């Protein structure tokens, strides 16, 4: 089963201030990487780089962030297109979610994933056959 990861899951890989979440994120990514079921988007990759090099309490040096980005680009990556942007704008208004969350949802749906792992969206919510799961909830 293919699964889409929101940016926050990836950022926890490098967040030493949250060791329990770091361990859970690593296990989740390892599991899906081994199974070839991990899906990201160009938006997630962009947000990831900015977050790990600028927003962490101990940001990565740019070179380390770039190396991590290169590794993540080996997974299946959905290219954000004008059509996905339009669909996200429509979903944002219809479902009252942020545009950026709506774009992640549209990318996940377009890639045929059935689960979207995110800490920022409503846990267990279902949208057009896509289930949102917060992997940090017990």
Image: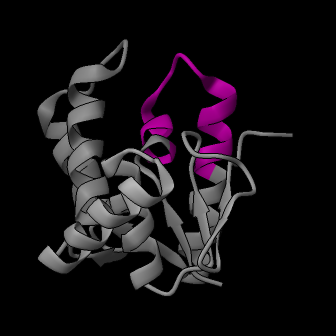
Determine the residue positioned at 54% across, 39% down. 120
Instruction: Examine the residues drawn in magenta and state their main secondary structure.
Output: helix
Q: Is residue 102 left or right of residue 62?
A: right
| Residue at x-position 29% and y-position 21% | 55
From the viewer's perspective, tell me whether residue 89 is left or right of residue 76: left
Mark count: 0
Question: Which residue appears farthest toward the front when viewing the image?
Answer: 94
Instruction: Residue at 61%, 81% (x, y): give it.
Output: 35
Looking at this rendering, what residue extends furthest in the right direction?
Answer: 138
Quadrant location, the N terminus: bottom right
x and y, in percent, of residue 49 in the image: 22, 42
Q: Which residues are magenta?
A: 9-26
Residue that extends furthest to the top in the rendered view of this protein: 57
Residue 108 location in percent, x, y? 45, 73
Front in this rendered view, residue 19 or 113? 113
Residue 125 position by quadrant: bottom right
Give me the residue at 47% from left, 26% from top.
15
């Amino acid at each position: 089963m293919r699964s889409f990861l929101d940016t926050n899951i990836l950022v926890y890989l490098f967040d030493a201030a949250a060791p329990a979440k770091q361990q859970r994120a690593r296990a989740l990514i390892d599991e899906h990487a081994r199974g070839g079921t991990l899906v990201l988007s160009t938006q997630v990759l962009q947000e990831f780089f900015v977050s790990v090099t600028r927003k962490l309490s101990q940001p990565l040096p740019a070179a380390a962030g770039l190396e991590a980005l290169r590794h993540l680009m080996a997974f299946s990556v959905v290219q954000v297109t004008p059509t996905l942007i339009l669909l996200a704008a429509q979903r944002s208004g219809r479902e009252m979610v942020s545009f950026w969350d709506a774009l992640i949802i549209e990318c996940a749906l377009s890639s045929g994933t059935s689960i979207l792992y995110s800490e920022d969206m409503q846990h267990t919510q279902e949208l057009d056959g896509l289930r949102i799961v917060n992997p940090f909830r017990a």
